[in-house]
């Protein structure tokens, strides 16, 4: 995540149970394993972050 160092002040990992993996940017859900029924690909998470963090 070095690509976003200048744009992200902090990252927060929130433990959960039941196989839930979600990625949120400023409160907006950008990936949900539970909703999609599959694991995230690294590139799709990177693209989702880039789309919301770049000016």
Image (cartoon, rainbow, N blue to C red):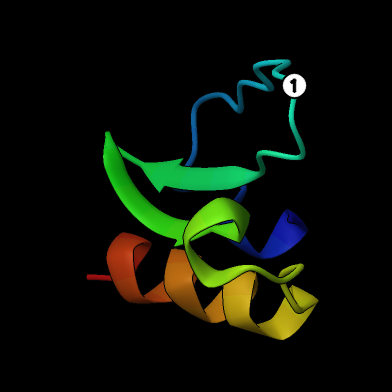
Residue positioned 61% across, 28% down in the render: 11
| Residue 46 placement, left or right of 42 | left
Q: Of 47 and 6, which appears nearest the observer?
A: 47
Q: Is residue 25 above or below residue 3?
A: above
Q: What x and y, as percent, mark residue 18?
A: 74, 30
Single out the residue that lies furthest toward the top. Answer: 15
Q: What x and y, as percent, mark residue 37?
A: 63, 68
Q: Of 11 and 37, which appears nearest the observer?
A: 37
Residue positioned 73% across, 15% down in the render: 15
| Residue 37 placement, left or right of 9 | right
Image quarter of residue 53: bottom left
Q: In this view, does 46 lie above or below 49?
A: below
CA neighbours of label 1 inside 10 A, class few (<14), some (14 to 19), many (20+)? few
Residue positioned 42% across, 43% down in the render: 24
Q: Of 15 and 48, which appears nearest the observer?
A: 15
Q: What x and y, as percent, mark residue 36?
A: 53, 70
State the SS at label 1: loop
Q: Of 11 and 29, which appears nearest the observer?
A: 29
Instruction: Quickly name the residue at label 1.
Output: 17
Q: What x and y, as percent, mark residue 4?
A: 58, 56
Q: In this view, does 34 lie above or below 11?
A: below
Q: In which quarter of the image is the C terminus?
A: bottom left
| Residue 44 placement, left or right of 53 | right
In this rendering, the count of numbered labels is: 1
Q: In which quarter of the image is the N terminus?
A: bottom right
Image quarter of residue 54: bottom left
């Amino acid at each position: 995540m070095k690509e976003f160092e200048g744009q992200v002040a902090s990252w927060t990992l929130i433990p959960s149970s039941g196989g839930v993996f979600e990625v949120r940017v400023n409160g907006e859900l950008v990936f949900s394993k539970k909703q999609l029924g599959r694991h995230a690909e690294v590139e799709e998470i990177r693209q989702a972050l880039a789309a919301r963090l770049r000016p």
